[in-house]
């Protein structure tokens, strides 16, 4: 395959899909190349889902310039895409009055960064009114009402679906192997990007490759930054204790980390984490020492929380650049190559503002942006049976026979939802999981996995033993059992 386009985006995390969706507003041919079988399977899927207020980033950094503006744009992204986003606010807590100056410094940084409505609360009764189950030892908090939570994988899937509907081409299982800079005005674009899918030619390349962004930059001779991966580990609690925690809760930050947070997730559960572990090589394996650190940090803020409700743990990776800042801009090594690298926290928060900035940069560098009048900003989500009232359930089950079959008992996910997820592009167990929440409940797939394998097999027309958890040889079954 050889394809010509205007813009090639490398990476389909929240940054890559966000850029693809925003570029689809214009009359452009846009291609996204992703090494994984689905969107958002790198840094995006394994984080706390926090939309930070913007006080933490040091004023003058690239992070600071995008964090508060990104926060303010979140409704512009989530509402038309029907993605749940909740401005629940955040606390930074201290148990020592002697640490009040640190809260004041964070508030000053926030004001300098353009964060609204910040306040320091020292009235214990008011703290308890806002967060009833927080430790009695908390003396004061920095309250940031504009902070919020979103499901990062749901947002990324929605951006992908909307971009695809508006004409963007996505190529999965397509790790970039080589980027040739042609520098020939008569060629099919300035860049020739090679993957296992073939060769794609484009006038501009956006490097949004997350952990691999330093490696991709070096393919065009740009060694201006390198990525040093860091792992963060988490505990996830059952949604049965939804409501025990009201806000995003941080301790005072350290030099390396914002600290072990305790927060409601956008979809109802509670998350503890992350810690910060620099790595020589990327790894999402959890460790006993790391998980204990997360556990102890969380219970220090919420000592009475029911830790028996922990249903699973996981780890995610941060794409930390040597500068410890975002690396955003046109490469000095070659024109038309735009780096969007080193996107660690608060990258999810900053994503809408980063997209706007990069599109403006592309226009400045010569890309013609003609508005496509056929662009549709909206995207309908998969119907969620668990959130329906009785009238909606009656209508839904009348319309869809498969809606009467509950596949995932914990999250009340129907076969109709599973089938629609597959129709929209899910061809793995994890693809279904992130679209429908099946296998995210108390049993973590103990009951529904066999049914999901059967449904994937039926809908895709493949053998059950060819069904994978997340592609790349992650098979569950080896073959059929023999009688006798």
Image (cartoon, helix red, strand yellow):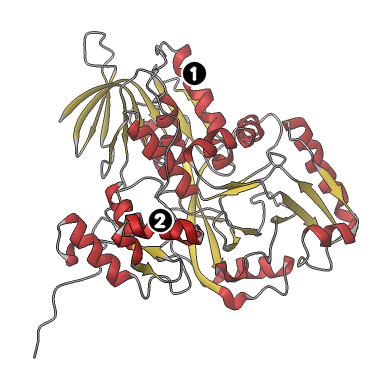
User: Is label 2 or label 1 in front?
Assistant: 2
- Residue in front for this viewpoint, 243 or 397: 397
Q: Quadrant of the N terminus?
A: top left
Crowd around label 2: few <14 · some 14–19 · many ≥20 (10 Å): few
Q: Quadrant of residue 97?
A: bottom right
- Residue in front for this viewpoint, 392 or 165: 392
Question: Residue 318 bears which disc, if any?
Answer: none
Q: Is residue 154 left or right of residue 4?
A: right
On the question of residue 129 being in view, the answer is yes
Say which residue appears at 55% left-offset and 34% top-offset.
326
Q: CA distance from mark 2 to mark 1?
A: 48 Å
Q: Quadrant of residue 298?
A: bottom right
Q: Is residue 66 left or right of residue 22?
A: right
Q: Position of residue 431 (x, y in %)?
A: 34, 54
- Residue in front for this viewpoint, 119 or 163: 163
- Relative to 63, is 192 above or below? above
- Relative to 158, is 222 above or below? above
- Relative to 201, is 301 above or below? below
Q: Quadrant of the C terminus?
A: bottom left
Which element is circle 2 on? helix
Q: Position of residue 443 (x, y in %)?
A: 44, 74
Crowd around label 1: few <14 · some 14–19 · many ≥20 (10 Å): some
Which element is circle 1 on? helix
Say which residue appears at 36% left-offset and 56% top-offset.
417
Q: Is residue 426 left or right of residue 340?
A: left
Q: Position of residue 452 (x, y in %)?
A: 29, 65
Q: In the rendered image, which residue does mark 2 sit on? A: 395
Question: Residue 361 bears which disc, if any?
Answer: 1
């Amino acid at each position: 395959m050889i394809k010509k386009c205007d813009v090639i985006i490398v990476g389909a995390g929240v940054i890559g899909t966000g850029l693809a969706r925003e570029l689809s507003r214009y009359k452009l041919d846009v291609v996204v190349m992703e090494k994984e079988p689905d969107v958002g399977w790198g840094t995006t899927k394994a984080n706390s889902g926090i939309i930070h207020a913007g006080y933490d980033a040091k004023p003058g950094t690239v992070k600071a310039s995008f964090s508060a503006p990104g926060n303010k744009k979140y409704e512009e992204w989530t509402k038309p895409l029907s993605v749940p986003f909740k401005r629940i606010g955040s606390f930074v807590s201290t148990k020592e009055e002697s640490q009040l100056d640190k809260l004041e410094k964070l508030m000053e940084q926030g004001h300098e960064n353009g964060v609204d409505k910040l306040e320091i609360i020292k009235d214990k009764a008011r703290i308890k009114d806002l967060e009833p189950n927080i430790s009695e030892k908390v003396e004061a908090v920095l309250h940031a009402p504009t902070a919020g939570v979103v499901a990062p994988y749901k947002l990324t899937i929605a951006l992908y679906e909307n971009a695809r509907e508006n004409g963007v081409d996505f190529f999965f299982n397509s790790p970039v192997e080589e980027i040739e800079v042609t520098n020939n005005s008569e060629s099919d674009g300035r860049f020739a990007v090679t993957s296992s899918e073939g060769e794609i030619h484009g006038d501009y390349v956006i490097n949004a490759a997350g952990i691999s962004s330093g490696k991709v930059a070096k393919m065009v001779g740009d060694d201006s930054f390198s990525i040093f991966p860091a792992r963060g580990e988490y505990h996830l609690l059952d949604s049965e204790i939804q409501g025990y925690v009201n806000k995003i809760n941080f301790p005072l930050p350290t030099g390396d980390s914002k600290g072990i947070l305790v927060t409601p997730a956008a979809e109802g559960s509670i998350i503890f984490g992350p810690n910060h572990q620099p790595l020589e090589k990327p790894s999402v394996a959890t460790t006993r020492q790391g998980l204990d650190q997360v556990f102890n940090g969380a219970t220090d803020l919420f000592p009475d929380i029911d830790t028996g409700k922990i249903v699973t743990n996981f780890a995610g990776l941060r794409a930390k650049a040597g500068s410890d800042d975002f690396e955003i801009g046109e490469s000095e090594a070659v024109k038309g190559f735009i780096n969007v690298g080193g996107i660690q926290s608060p990258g999810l928060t900053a994503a809408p503002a980063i997209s706007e900035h990069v599109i403006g940069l592309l226009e400045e560098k010569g890309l013609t942006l003609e508005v496509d009048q056929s662009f549709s900003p909206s995207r309908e989500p998969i119907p969620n049976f668990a959130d329906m009232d009785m009238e909606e359930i009656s209508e839904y089950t009348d319309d869809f026979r498969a809606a009467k079959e509950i596949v995932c008992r914990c999250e009340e996910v129907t076969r109709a939802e599973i089938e629609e997820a597959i129709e929209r592009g899910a061809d793995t167990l994890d693809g279904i999981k992130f679209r429908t929440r099946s296998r995210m409940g108390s049993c973590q797939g103990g009951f529904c996995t066999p049914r999901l394998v059967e449904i994937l097999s039926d809908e895709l027309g493949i053998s059950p033993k060819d069904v994978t958890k997340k592609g790349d040889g992650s098979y569950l079954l080896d073959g059929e059992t023999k009688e006798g």
